[in-house]
Amino acid sequence: MKEKLKVLLIGAAFSADLHMDGYARMLDKVEIVGIADRDLSRVSALADRYGITGYTPYDSFERAIAEAECDLVDICMPNFLHHEIAMLALDKGRHIVCEKPLATTVEDGEEMIATAKKKGLHIYYAEDWLGSPAMNKALNIINSGKLGKLLYVRARECHNGSHSPFAQKIALCGGGCMIHLGVHPVGFMLAMKNNEWDSVVAMTSGGLNNNLKHTSMEGEDFAAAIMRFKDGTFAVMEGNYVTQGGMEDYIDFYCSEGCLHVDLTFSSALRAFSIPGLEYTVEKADITTGWSNPAVDEKYNLGYVAEIAHFVDCAANDSEARIGLRGVDGLEALKVINKIYQSAKEGVLIKNEK
């Protein structure tokens, strides 16, 4: 095992902050050797926020990958750049971490997976739900059998709209709220059921003037899918951009002898009342005045800290990630989302051909 894993971070904006928080908690195992972003002021701001020193700033991801001596390249860039950056990193012989979705097209995702396999490298797929302490506790309870047989799961991630300008066009992001938000319940359910799904049927708002609210967005602002798994379990998976009041990550498990409800975003030991408004409460909160439940350690509770720690240990030992966090799992999630879009467009139930 390497003394310290050398990491190159590509991107210095929203998702890079989520990942850097994880790395900053394990600097005994990790050395951040470089941070790349075309805006170098974002690079320095990110590094200063987490006390990172001794790194090389790059204003070009091409130059960063070509020059940085690293073991792991962490891709925290807009969706349409995932494939290009991944291919450069894999060609350089680096393991990679890739934010969701794996790519904007199945073809690009397949090329990434095939290249990594050919070169004996690992792609780690950043699905934060699988690192959440609450979700892992829920899975332990479900797997204990004390609630009986799992029958049905309802899972959703929703908020009031993407902060990213790249989310407005399908060519840049691959779709709408399903590929941005619904990818979490899809990825979680696939991991829970070992990617063994039987069929799916879906509806979406359709994009542009067909959307419920965001009529300038090419992708949908509402999407829901019903999936049946090969063991007979059903799941409803939803993503939307029309939810006010903060991001909602809710997962409900219904079993033959009980049920279990998980709230990843609004559960907190704190309850506050503020007339002028707090500085921050939870992600995507529209207002912070009045009563609120401020997050205590949001990145930890959402799973980012644990997923980064898992990827660091796997890369240091040249090993595969657990199910749901592998590149092949990201590809399967992307394939399912494409089937969801196909079902919504054609108005038909889609069977799994595998």
Image (cartoon, rainbow, N blue to C red):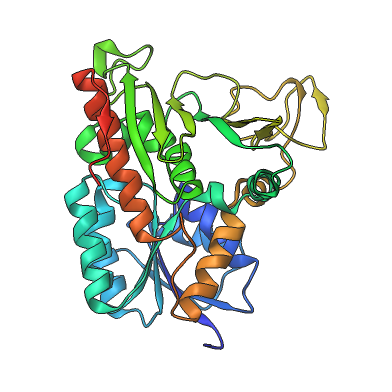
Check the image and report above or below for 348 versus 98.
above
Nearer to the camera, 166 or 136 = 136
Q: Quadrant of residue 138?
A: top right
Can you tell which quarter of the image residue 170 is in?
A: top left
What residue is at 64 percent from the left and 35 percent from the top?
265
Residue 259 position, x and y percent, is 69, 30
Where residue 14 appears, as percent x and y from the top left, is 47, 47
The correct choice, above or below, for 129 with respect to 40 in the image is above
Image coordinates of residue 302 in percent, x first then y, are 61, 46
- The residue sitting at 35% across, 45% down in the picture is 333
Residue 2 horizontal/vertical position (percent): 52, 88
Q: Report the residue at 54% width, 52% height from top.
A: 18
Looking at the rendered structure, the number of numbered marks drawn on it comes to 0
Residue 28 seen from this side: yes
Q: Is residue 171 left or right of residue 72?
A: left
Instruction: Inspect this view and state whether residue 37 appears.
Output: no
Please identify the quarter of the rendering in which residue 245 is found.
top right
Figure check: 245 above or below 18: above
Q: Is residue 281 left or right of residue 124?
A: right
